[in-house]
Amino acid sequence: MVAGVARSTRGTWVITVGVLMAVGTLTVLIVALPQLRFVVSVPRFRLSLEAGGALLAFLTGALAYLQFSLTGSRRWMLIAVAFGLLAVNRVTFGIVVPPGVIGSQTDVYLWTTARLVIGGLLVAASFGDAGSRSPGRPLRVFATVAVGAVVGVALVEWLVYAFRESLPSLFVAGPPSSAEQLSGVGGLTPTAWLIALAGTALYLVAAGALLTRTRRPEPAPTWLPSALVIAGFSHIHYALAPTVFTSYISTGDLLRLAFSAILLVGLLYEVRRVYLLERARASELEVAYEAERARSMELEAVDRAKAELFGIVTHELLHPVAALRGFALTLKRYWRQLDQARRDDMLERLATASVHLRDLAEESAAAIRLETDMFSVAMRHERAVDLVRRAAEVSHELGGRLNVRVAPGAEEAVVDADPARVMQVFRNLLSNAVKYGDAGTPVELAVERDRSEVVFSVIDQGPGISPEDVPRLFQRFSRLSAPGQEGVRGAGLGLYICRRIVETHGGRIWVDSEPGTGSTFRFALAVVEGR
């Protein structure tokens, strides 16, 4: 964005300076070489020039007002008032009041008075604050300033008209009426030249101030400085050939035509810029809406998952809690009546129920953390063999049924892992092997290196998994439907937690199984390069 503002600023400077040099050179040549001056009689051109100029000035003022209503910028408000006055001035002294009705010299004074006020407003706009803020009631603010400006101009023009007989003369030998008289530079008094130079100075100061302001990323009209340069020099050209209230045209009229053309280009540029901005804003809003919609759906899914999790966990917790309470009360009340074998059996059942309760609590806590920002891993270099051996040491449920196999090439393999999280994966997979495997059958825990990965495997000799269960196996709350396994308890979170942990490590997890042949659950982690 900053680069775009810088490019726009450079372009504005280049164009404005180019226009200044071109118009300035033309002015110097016309002053130095009288034969370059021209005055041409075009009776119907004046009305078209004033009508077209008034329309473009009005549209420019309306555009500036829209910018003011959107940004609250005092600069745009003053620009809107200035161009509104310019439109009124061109309609009044170019269409409503025909030349010569008031008097040629008085016409010039009244016309020039409004032009000088407009120049003053543009200077004020150039130095005005362009910061964006809420405009409050833009129409009321604009109407107040616009009415004040109109009343002020009307009052000054009334004074000019009232004291018209006392005003200094503008023409040396009376108002010129022929092409030869209009092109004679000596036909104006010093007062006329002073007024013309004052108008030029006002518009050039406004253009320069706007150029200085465009160095900052503020909403300044980049096309306006060039227009103001042309409008400023038109005062000098009208002093060289005062054709403004005649049926003749000169370079001053051509400059006013160029001024109107720049306003037209500026209007088209602003409309296109606003259209592109609104289209980009609409695209951003659409993206934001889709993101918010996705987030809302995700939050709804999380809420549903939490509610479902709460229901399932509550239901599942009742069984081990009831078992623990039942066995504990039985032992408390009938300890002396029970023989040692019954006591040992009940203590074993207490231990089994407590392990089940522990697994449920761990799975529930892990599932809740996975749905929030609380889940994280603390990665460090770990030898794959050490992870497998640690998992085998804590697998008390398997007793002597667990076989550990380390394939050649995996002895020194190192992976980035969070040991506690990886142990949770091993514990879930080995616990499933106990739950779903055939009683008394061996379970194998294997590790092997496959190119850039270390693959860990848990192999059981259970009934296997039906093909329709495999696609949803690692989903939340998934439960196997293998025949004979309906009584296996669990919340259906273990494999989901395994998948999330492995994926957080940048790995992958999958299962190889067919009904009747057992199951092999595998997960792979990337090997640390250079180890």
Image (spheres, rainbow, N blue to C red):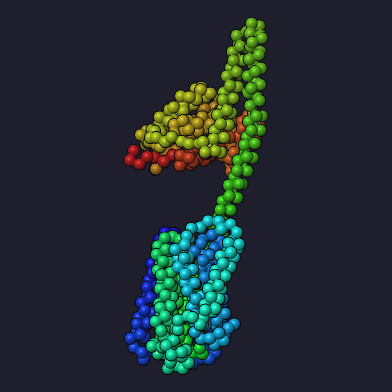
The answer to whether residue 58 is above or below residue 240 is above
Residue 93 in view here: yes
- Residue sitting at 52 percent across and 70 percent down? 82
Q: On the image, which quarter does residue 213 sit in?
A: bottom left
Rendered location of residue 31, percent (x, y): 35, 85
Q: Nearer the viewer, residue 317 or 234?
A: 234
The answer to whether residue 21 is above or below residue 188 is above
Residue 237 in view here: no
Q: Is 411 positioned to the left or the right of 325 in the image?
A: left
Q: Is 11 positioned to the left or the right of 317 in the image?
A: left
- Residue sitting at 43 percent across and 66 percent down? 210
Rendered location of residue 165, percent (x, y): 50, 82
Count up the numbered dots. 0
Rendered location of residue 98, percent (x, y): 57, 86
- Residue sitting at 58 percent across and 21 percent down? 354
Rendered location of residue 327, percent (x, y): 64, 16
Quadrant location of the C terminus in the rendered image: top left
Q: Is 446 positioned to the left or the right of 330 in the image?
A: left
Q: Nearer the viewer, residue 446 or 263?
A: 263
Quadrant location of the N terminus in the rendered image: bottom left
Looking at the image, the residue that sits furthest to the front is: 166
Q: Nearer the viewer, residue 514 or 195?
A: 195
Q: On the image, which quarter does residue 203 sit in?
A: bottom left
Looking at the image, the residue that sits furthest to the top is: 336
Q: Nearer the viewer, residue 247 or 306?
A: 247
The answer to whether residue 205 is above or below residue 43 is above
Q: On the image, which quarter does residue 19 sit in?
A: bottom left
- Residue sitting at 65 percent across and 29 percent down? 314
